[in-house]
Every structure is written in C-alpha cells, then in structure tokens.
Amino acid sequence: MESEWDETLLYQTREERELQFSPSKWFTRISPAAALVENHIGILTKGSEEARQTLDCELDMAYGNKPLEKIDIFGGQTLPADAPVFCYIHGGDWAMLGRESSSFMAPYLVESGIVVIPIGYQKAPEVDMPEIVTEIKKAVSFILKWAKNRGTRSVYIGGHCAGGHLAAMMLGIDWTKECDISNDLLKGGILISGIFDVRPLVDTYIGDPLNLTREVAWECSPCKHVDTIASLSRNRTLIIVMGGKDTPTFRQQSSQFAEAMRKRKVSVIVKDFEEYDHFQISEKSWFEYKEITNVMMA
C-alpha cells in the first residue's frame, strides 16, 4: 500500500531531494566528492580486472541485440553443474558504471562455490527506466533458462543502489509466465542500499535523463509491487544491506522495504554496517558479511 511509505521527501525541493540521493556529498573520507566516486569506480574496476585475469570466464555473451545487452559468466566451467548462480546488477543511477566493473566480488564468490553473472544494460539517456527494467527482465529470463539447462540448484539476484532497485523489480516477475521457468529456481535477493521508491527522483538530475514522470516512477517502484513481490517470495530469502553512514533516505528506504516484506511473511535478513558509507558497503559487503555466501550455498 502507498501509505506504508514515508512520502515526506516527495514534497521537498529539488535541491533537497537531489542531496538525499547524492551520497558522495555526505562523506568526507575522500574529498572532493568527485574524487570519492572516482576512488569507488577504481576499486570496482581493479577487482573486476583481476577476476577476468584469474577466473574461468565467458565474456560478452549476448542476451539481446543492443550493444550493452550482454552478460559475463565467472566459474561456469570449473564449478559443479548444480552450483548456485548469482546475478549481479550494477548501480550508477541507471546511467553510469557497467558490466566491466561488476565482477569485483567474483573471485571470492567463485571460491565459495557460486557462479557469478554480471548483467550489462543500456543506460540513460539512451533509454528510459521502463526500458531498463525490460532489458533486465530479458537478461534474467536468459540466465534462468541457462541455469535450468545447466542443472543449477538455485539462482540469486542482487545489486547495489540502482542495481538493488532493478533486482527488487525482478523479484516481482512471475517467471513461470515470463519464460516457463519455475519461480522456485529464483531463491532470493541481495539488495545493497537499493532504491525502492523512485518517485523522489522525478525532476532531479538523476530522473531527468530517464525522462522520469511521477506515473512512470511509481510504476517502476518496488514499493508499489510489495504484495506481488511477497507472494512470489514465500520460499525466498532476501538480504537487505545498508550502511550506517549512508544518507537518511537510502537507509529509510531499505528499512521500509524490509519491514514491508516481513509484514507479508517473507524471510528477510537485514545487515547494517554501522561504519560504512554508500560506496563502502558495495565494495566490502561480499567479503565481510559471510551470511551472503551462507544463504546462497544453503
């Protein structure tokens, strides 16, 4: 229900709303803000380059016809056929980053026995948010079919920031109807500082390149679809990760989404890294929070 969500931010100024979704402006461990973002991208890129150099990988596998509609598969040739699969969707405000910097966690997860598949997608301003959601749906359909043919016992989906938003949207898809794959194959999600209510981004520097309207933002918000997500997630485990030093709105949205899922009897695990900011939880969660691998390997 819409009333479950704090709508205070919707009535604040553009500047106030933009600040809440600009985490680089909140932290001083690296300054200026642009240097903090550059450092974050550098960490992800370096880790992803190491993954491509050290792991068995199938790169640039197309799931669609557009240039960025591709996935990479790490560990698929060396891990057992029934190994769990983790699909990762990158963040970057639906406009930055990419698949090439999204396998930084793969060495650790593959060593733990998990196949890792970063998903690429077209970005704003070339495409709007509904198109991005459609592309991710196409990618996940492709991966679920691949996983079923492989004999995979479970698939998990996750992402950071905008990627957490897209992963949450995929939890509301009936995959039996979408691609004739049992919904039971998708066992859960790892949502790291996700965006679950997109409406505050209308008329901001983030929403403008996406041509975001109030109506489109609501339709593309996981918070609108909590009943559907919950009904399809009765046998899933959702891990929601947030940072103690993230912006108030990012923290609030994660907390509200977790509570909405719990209220609907979905198994939810919340991890709050008190000392980490928005970028650090993306960089470090996979390596420091063992429950992520424990859940996927169960």
Image (tube, rainbow, N blue to C red):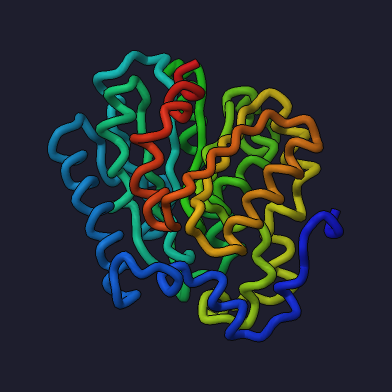
Task: Please report the residue visible at 55 percent of the width from the left and 53 percent of the height from the top.
Answer: 194
* Residue 95 point in image, percent of width and height: 43, 68
Task: Report the front residue among 20 and 131.
Answer: 20
Residue 62 relative to residue 42: left or right: right
In this rendering, the answer to whether 40 lies above or below 191 is below
* Residue 179 point in image, percent of width and height: 61, 35
* Residue 88 point in image, percent of width and height: 43, 43
Task: Please report the residue visible at 69 percent of the width from the left and 37 percent of the height from the top.
Answer: 174
In this rendering, the answer to whether 162 lies above or below 187 is below
Question: Could you tell me if residue 141 is visible in this image?
Answer: no
The quarter of the displayed image where residue 36 is located:
bottom left
Task: Please report the residue visible at 42 percent of the width from the left and 33 percent of the height from the top.
Answer: 289
In this rendering, the answer to whether 214 lies above or below 149 is below
The quarter of the displayed image where residue 278 is located:
bottom left
Task: Please report the residue visible at 31 percent of the width from the left and 75 percent of the height from the top.
Answer: 34
Residue 108 relative to residue 182: left or right: left
* Residue 153 point in image, percent of width and height: 50, 17
Task: Report the front residue among 74 and 3.
Answer: 3
The quarter of the displayed image where residue 178 is located:
top right
How many labels were placed on the picture? 0
Residue 183 relative to residue 191: left or right: right
